Amino acid sequence: MKKSEAASNLIDYIDTQIMAGIYPPGTKLPSLRSLARKFRISYSTALRGIDYLEQQGKLRKSPQSGVYVLSPIGLEAHHPEGDRCIAVVTPQGDWFDENMPGIFHSALTTIKSLVLSYNYSLLIMPQPQLRIPPEMLERINRLCSGVILMKEFDEEMTELPLTVPAVAILTENDYNGKLSIVGLDPFNAAYQALSYFRERQVTRLHLVIFDAPVYRNRALLLENLWRENGGEIVERSLFRRGELPRLERVEKNCGYFFTSDNLLYSCEENFRQDTGKSLIGTCPVLAVDGKSLVMPWNMRMPTIAVDWKQIGRLAFTGCLARIENTLHTPRRIYLPGTLVNRQNLPGQTGKKALLKP
């Protein structure tokens, strides 16, 4: 059976959840109707996606019961430890499954394909915490050729005792040149945000920041650029992991810059719940990273988006270059974002427009 293009997002999502250990063997999948709603496809298209994965030996349909995971997708079958093994440390649980499935499954699917095409084995290491435990670090150093980190571990870890080539996504700290960094270009994003707000005659800016190094850096770069161009920073709202992002007050003549799409999404939902109005429709807003374009949200927002499949490709090639050439030094590899003004709020048809960076 050929892979259904219409069901490709569903197929890739389930494929990656199995690979990452989020759906271990025996797991019962959500109902076909809920999966169809989540990925905005028909029931029959969702069924074709499930049939494709069943034919590959990854799922089993049980009449009157549901769809179950049959086995992990070839992790042990590819002998995932040895001289040609690349580890990927991923988020796990609710953080991976509910908050950020789009970007990580996009990047991880690309990494998986490239790892196998270069005859390396792939070891997925789900890690729910913001610290990599010593036993996991020891296993990576002893058994793997290199590692890709897909989480903001520098939010809590001040040291990273890795002895193998390492590349990180959504990270700011390179640990004194130990890590290669792949991500959205924060300088490019700051200049795009400046142009975006100035086109809307905004002179006062409120920064809404997620409290982790990569997000604080995005805000700092824009703040410096904004002040250099005569703008005023009226407030900074800093939210830590686990806090409920909610703006205490909103001014119509003020611009709001969110360092993550997740922050804007949460603030929009809470603002609508509190006021019955749309935050996006009330004042000029802009977010960064483009999660809203690849996640199954029912809302689209103005965002500076990056291609997360390309992020995955760059993470793999950066790791491979350092594995195969010990003289290849760690570096920062940044992708410019694309400014997308796309609004589709619940109950609205919305308009879609692509703005030039």
Image (cartoon, rainbow, N blue to C red):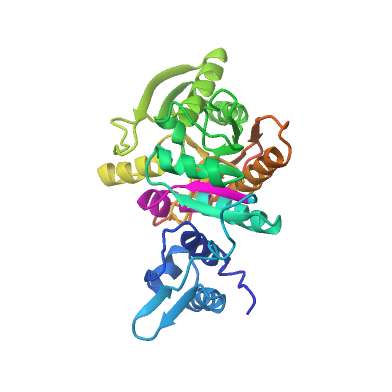
Q: Is residue 348 above or below residue 57?
A: above
Q: Is residue 1 above or below residue 86?
A: below
The span picked out in magenta is 85-103
Horizontal and vertical percent for residue 83?
64, 49
**Left or right: 133 in relation to 246:** right
Quadrant of the image containing the N terminus: bottom right
**Left or right: 308 in relation to 258:** right
Asked if residue 97 is among those painted magenta in the image, a careful observer would answer yes
Front residue of 74 and 145: 145
Front residue of 290 and 354: 290
Q: Residue at x 43, y 55 (%)?
A: 298
Q: Is residue 254 visible?
A: no
Horizontal and vertical percent for residue 307?
62, 46
Quadrant of the image containing the C terminus: top right
Q: Quadrant of residue 192?
A: top right
**Left or right: 98 in relation to 89:** left
Horizontal and vertical percent for residue 156?
39, 31
Q: Residue at x 64, y 58 (%)?
A: 113
Q: Is residue 21 above or below residue 334?
A: below
Q: Is residue 180 visible?
A: yes
Front residue of 185 and 283: 185
Residue, far left:
274
